[in-house]
Amino acid sequence: MLYCFLILYIDEAGSGDQQHKTMNKLCILMVISLIVITGLLIVIIVLSLRPDEPLKTCQSPDCVMTADSMLSRMQLSADPCDDFYAYACNAAIQDPTIPPSASRWGVIEEVDDRNKAIMKRLLEKPGSEYKGVNSTAVEKAKFYFAACMNGTARETRTKKRLLQVVNEVGSWPLTNDPVSGIWSSDSWSMENTLSQLFWYKSMTLFKMTITADAKNSSAYRIMAFVKSEQRLYLEESYKMPLSYLHGLLGNDVIDLHKYLRKALNTSIAMTEEVIVYAVDYIPKMAALVQAADKETLASYMVWHVIITLLPYMPIAYRMPLLELESTLSGVSASEDMWEDCVTDILSEIRQSFVHNLSQWMDKLTRHRAMVKADGIIQKIGYPEFIKDPAKLDDYYAKVTIHANSQFRNVLNVRFFQVQF
């Protein structure tokens, strides 16, 4: 080190020798290294002189259960530096046990299961108190769950109410009786059936809803026409007059003016601007409709609402659905009744969440939320009014829920969601 200082002194004195300059740089690096090493030694000495502190670990039941769940999926014998995935997940992969009521099983499904159990406890808890006051909205949620859990009432339910629904949506060629209605190709109207299906939330050929304008969030009550299973992805929207959409349909295939008047109970001008999310789909769908006979169209449309109501009928009606699901996805058993009922309630919550996005989210957040809505299970966002018991009760004041009639409750909720 003394040699380094001597070299630096000679260089400062004006020596231009190249060797001295090289030695100068090396000496500077040595000095910097010495300083760093000295600093590290000081830190180590200070830390070693500090008294030992006990390691803080979480010992709560939640922490213990979480740790156990994580460890049960890990293969601790694997070297995480060689294969971290094997280290973290191999035990879970080697135990492919899937519950008979599920087509897949993993962490997300387990969390979903636990959340359903929490929801069940809340719905079974006596009383309807919310933030210190009795809430009619909470009472209705518990009535809905209680009616769903009434297995005796479900199994004694007759087909009469289901046939009455068929009658209300325009009759059905497959039943064709006094209760469900006598079907006739001469009197059957596609626009009448489509408008009734709208109120049952069973839109077959296309989905029509009221939403915010994607390009002007201050403008509400804009009609959006999409494919029946399509999400409202904002970047795919096109605004056009109703008359132009009518032209895409071929003008005489579906009378949009008649359909909207019956569905919305008001006359809509053909100059009204609408939002279309499936411009390519509309004329293709219209061509298929034009080529089909009335009986085929009526059978297809009414079946769409029937299949959504079969889960609320006796087991003889539900078994064909379970057999179909078993063939398609490997599910060999239905969920326990309480899980099915909680899932039904959560499904309605999710649909209300998507329906109300435009009212309490900015455009960017709304877009992201719509994309993720299907993946949201329980912990979802909410508008501020639900934290006020009076406002919450007022919002649900017009929906009627019975403590002993699941079928009527399902229909009432659907009508409420369409209306509000």
Image (spheres, rainbow, N blue to C red):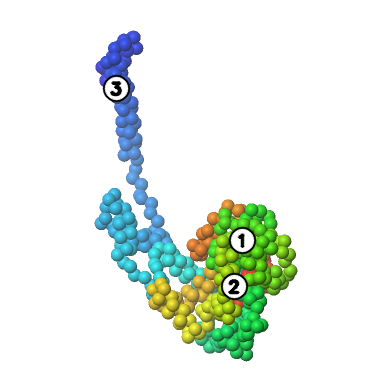
Secondary structure beneath disc 3? helix
Q: Which residue is mark 3?
A: 26
* Earlier-in-chain disc, 1 versus 2: 1
Q: CA distance from mark 1 to mark 3?
A: 72 Å
Q: Percent x, y for residue 211? A: 64, 61
Q: Percent x, y for residue 74? A: 32, 59
Can residue 29 be seen here?
Answer: yes
Secondary structure beneath disc 1? strand
Name the one closer to the observer, 272 or 165.
272
Q: Percent x, y for residue 344? A: 53, 73
Q: Please, is residue 248 above or below residue 47 in the view?
A: below
Q: Which residue is mark 1?
A: 276
Image label count: 3
* Earlier-in-chain disc, 2 versus 3: 3
The residue under label 1 is which amino acid type?
Val
Which mark is nearer the camera, 1 or 3?
A: 1
Q: Which residue is mark 2?
A: 290
Which mark is nearer the camera, 2 or 3?
A: 2
Q: Residue 153 falls in which quadrant of the image?
A: bottom right
The residue under label 3 is which amino acid type?
Leu
Relative placement, left or right, of 273 versus 323 is: right
The residue located at (32%, 55%) in the rendering is 85
